[in-house]
């Protein structure tokens, strides 16, 4: 069976979802979206969707900012997403992509008075960056979008040209990922990830006011580090050269999960190996997302009915 999508209020084959060439969002970047992971846990025979509600809440915020309306409540969209996966019986790790876009086929750049269309689908998905071996980064020559120009805290399709410019520059220069500074020269984030430093026994990450996307993984790691490792995270401005002197650096995001950074601008980070704090946090993170740590059960939405296992 081919993959399904939920489109225009119905479950339909993904391959049949087509949009017209004149679609507003295609020309003007007038859409917002999310990236969500579902983790298949073979021991529990269960699929857990990580922080599904928080992703739809962020989508609602993006939508509000660019004058759009979600087709249903956050809770209903969560249920639709669960049903989308359950109907397909998917039993492997997936990436879920909801997209809300301006669907009119007209010329004229604006936000108001247009129609919104919504689609969500899920694809089998593996690693995005090499979180096992770690990655090499460069500081991009492109600056992160300023919130006063394009709302930086929203996940708006048009703003991803900023990420794409930085990512291609980095990869074509032989690196794995880009790190963008914001317009005042402080560290913002990766092309599709937030960034953390380990320095002096503390975790440090750019504050939400640094034109970063308020990452849901970032937020999860702040709590996991505090509660499971007793490490607090300082959210503040981060200078570029702090990256070079950090003991450890890692990127995090739905796609990137927890990815160690071994080198930035040809300078090894710490001893150039994956650091202990990063490894520990990565391990804890994977336990949480796979639904293994009951303390974080509220972050893991089960897709399939929970079967009572026979107790001996
Ligand atoms: N920054 C950017 C630019 C991103 O695209 C993403 C991925 N959504 C992130 C950070 C990480 O956010 P999250 O942890 O919510 O996936």
Image (spheres, grey):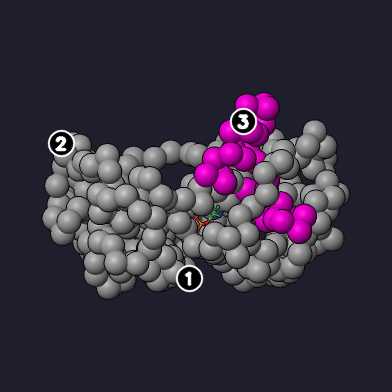
Q: Does the magenta run of residues contain 284?
A: no
Q: Quadrant of residue 239?
A: bottom right
| Magenta segment boundaries in residue numbering | 161-190
Quadrant of the snapshot with the C terminus: bottom left
Residue 65, horizontal then vertical, whole percent: 44, 69
Q: Is residue 69 above or below residue 17?
A: below
Mark 2 neighbour class, 10 Å CA radius: few under 14, some 14 to 19, many 20 or more? few
Considering only order in the chain, which callout, 3 or 1, is on the residue closer to the N terminus? 3
| Element assignment for label 3 | helix
The residue that mark 3 highlights is 171
Residues at discs 2 and 1 in contact (Cβ within 8 Å)? no
Q: Does the magenta run of residues contain 175?
A: yes
Kindly identify the residue that appears in the image at 15 percent across and 52 percent down: 11
The answer to whether the beta carbon of the residue marked 2 is less than 8 Å from any atom of ligand 1 is no
Kindly identify the residue that appears in the image at 76 percent across and 64 percent down: 237
Q: Nearer the viewer, mark 1 or mark 3?
A: 3
The span from disc 2 to disc 3 (Cα, nearest Å) is 35 Å
Considering only order in the chain, which callout, 1 or 2, is on the residue closer to the N terminus? 2
Considering only order in the chain, which callout, 3 or 2, is on the residue closer to the N terminus? 2
The residue that mark 2 highlights is 1
């Amino acid at each position: 069976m081919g993959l399904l999508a939920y489109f225009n209020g119905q479950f339909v084959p993904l391959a049949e979802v087509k949009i017209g060439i004149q679609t507003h969002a295609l020309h003007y970047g007038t859409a917002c979206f999310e990236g969500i992971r579902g983790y298949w846990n073979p021991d529990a025979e269960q699929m857990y969707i990580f922080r599904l509600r928080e992703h739809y809440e962020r989508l609602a915020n993006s939508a509000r900012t660019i004058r759009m309306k979600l087709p249903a409540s956050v809770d209903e969209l969560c249920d639709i997403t669960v049903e989308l996966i359950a109907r397909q019986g998917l039993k492997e790790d997936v990436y879920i992509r909801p997209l809300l876009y301006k669907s009119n086929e007209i010329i004229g750049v604006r936000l108001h008075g247009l129609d919104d269309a919504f689609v969500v689908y899920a694809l089998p998905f593996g690693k995005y960056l090499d979180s096992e071996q770690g990655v090499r980064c460069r500081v991009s020559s492109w600056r992160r979008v300023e919130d006063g120009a394009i709302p930086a805290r929203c996940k708006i399709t048009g703003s991803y040209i900023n990420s794409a410019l930085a990512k291609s520059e980095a990869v074509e220069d032989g690196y794995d990922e880009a790190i963008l500074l914001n317009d005042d020269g402080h560290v913002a984030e990766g092309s599709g990830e937030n960034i953390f430093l380990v320095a002096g026994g503390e975790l440090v990450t750019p504050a939400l006011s640094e034109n970063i996307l308020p990452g849901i993984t970032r937020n999860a790691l702040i709590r996991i580090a505090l509660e499971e490792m007793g490490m607090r995270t300082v959210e503040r401005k981060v200078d570029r050269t702090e990256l070079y002197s950090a003991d450890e650096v890692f990127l995090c995001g739905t796609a990137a999960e927890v990815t160690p950074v071994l080198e930035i601008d040809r300078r090894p980070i710490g001893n150039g190996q994956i650091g202990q704090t990063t490894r520990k946090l990565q391990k804890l993170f994977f336990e949480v997302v796979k639904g293994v740590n009951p303390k974080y059960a509220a972050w893991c939405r089960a897709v399939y009915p929970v079967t009572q296992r026979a107790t001996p």
